[in-house]
């Protein structure tokens, strides 16, 4: 059985990338620092790298609560420090009395200055406070170019990791029935949308599973998958509880509040 058989077909290119990283560290006896990875990518890295005698991996995105993290893959004789992850953390100052900024505004502003998504980590918006994490190699570029978010002029202050604010997201659990684990069926039930309204969401690439765009309504979801629908929020398939007498699936989901 190939290692690829343990992963979905769309994940196989990333699996190959991780295998290359692992071989690089083994062959050169040198560490490898990746860009920011989403939680599913981190899970793949962890399962492939492991903590063997030749190589192991440590993750950091600023603190334990961060979702997007960089992986530091290294030989066992090297000790890891916080500086090895090369993170730059910023607090955003803006006229919060006159404008409300959301996560999507900050994400859009960072993308609009030409920053690739893998070059920045979490964006935290909590009670009017905004912070974000970027890779050190793009920090100066961000400082020079990010002068506005939405319609607000902003000022960036680089801060220490100890001053990072907490994420405010929480999940409420619910049990519901679906006809199948097709993505369109799950989206329809979780977000209380008709199938007619769900189809355009896939056509317009507004649905993501495990942080990757899914444009096929027939995509089969599995336990542990994180689902996000633009404009509707995020949820997670926590478990399959059984079947109803009519053959429908009972699923347990967490819906982000």
Image (cartoon, rainbow, N blue to C red):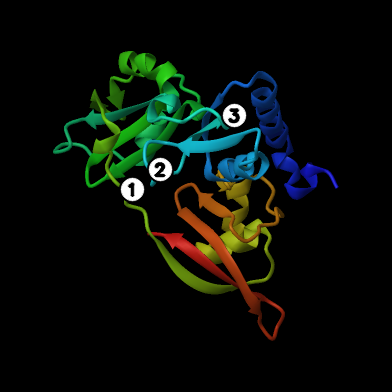
> Who's the residue at 73% across and 32% down the image?
16
Q: Local crowd at mark 1 within 10 Å, few (<14), some, or many (≥20)?
A: some
> Who's the residue at 29% across and 28% down the image?
90
In the image, which is nearer the foreground, mark 3 or mark 1? 3
Looking at the image, residue 48 lies above or below residue 195: above
Q: Which residue is mark 3?
A: 75
Q: Which residue is mark 2?
A: 66
Q: Residue 198's image quarter?
A: bottom right
> Who's the residue at 37% across and 36% down the image?
62
Q: First in sequence, mark 2 or 3: give its number.
A: 2
> Who's the residue at 59% across and 68% down the image?
239
In the image, which is nearer the foreground, mark 1 or mark 2? 2
Alpha carbon distance from label 1 to label 2: 8 Å
Q: Are marks 2 and 3 in contact (CB under 8 Å)?
A: no
Q: SS class of the residue under badge 1? A: loop
Residue 15 visible in image: yes
Q: Local crowd at mark 2 within 10 Å, few (<14), some, or many (≥20)?
A: some
Alpha carbon distance from label 3 to label 1: 32 Å
Q: Which mark is residue 167?
A: 1
Seen in the image, is 229 located left or right of residue 150? Answer: right
Seen in the image, is 197 located left or right of residue 7? Answer: left
Q: First in sequence, mark 3 or 1: give its number.
A: 3
> Where residue 75 sits in the image (x, y, percent)?
59, 29
Looking at the image, residue 170 lies above or below residue 189: above
């Amino acid at each position: 059985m190939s290692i690829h058989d343990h992963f979905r077909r769309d994940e196989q290119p990333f699996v190959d990338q991780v295998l290359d990283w692992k071989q690089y560290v083994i062959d050169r006896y040198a560490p490898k620092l990746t860009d920011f990875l989403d939680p599913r990518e981190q899970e793949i890295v962890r399962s492939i790298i492991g903590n063997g005698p030749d190589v192991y991996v440590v993750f950091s995105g600023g603190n334990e609560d961060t979702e997007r993290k960089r992986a530091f893959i290294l030989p066992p004789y090297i000790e890891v420090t916080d500086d090895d992850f090369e993170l730059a953390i910023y607090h955003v100052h803006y006229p919060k009395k006159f404008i409300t900024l959301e996560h999507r505004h900050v994400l859009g502003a960072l993308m609009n200055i030409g920053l690739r998504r893998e070059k920045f980590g979490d964006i935290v918006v909590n009670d009017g406070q905004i912070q974000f994490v970027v890779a050190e190699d793009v920090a100066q570029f961000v400082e020079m170019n990010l002068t506005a978010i939405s319609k607000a002029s902003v000022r960036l202050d680089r801060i220490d990791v100890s001053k990072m604010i907490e994420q405010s997201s929480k999940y409420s659990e619910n049990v519901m029935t679906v006809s199948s684990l097709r993505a369109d069926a799950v989206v329809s039930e979780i977000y209380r949308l008709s199938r007619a309204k769900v189809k355009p969401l896939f056509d317009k690439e507004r649905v993501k599973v495990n942080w990757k765009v899914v444009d096929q309504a027939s995509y089969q979801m599995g336990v542990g998958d994180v689902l996000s629908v633009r404009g509707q929020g995020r949820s997670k398939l926590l478990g399959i509880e059984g079947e109803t007498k009519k053959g429908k699936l009972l699923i347990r989901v967490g819906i982000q509040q």
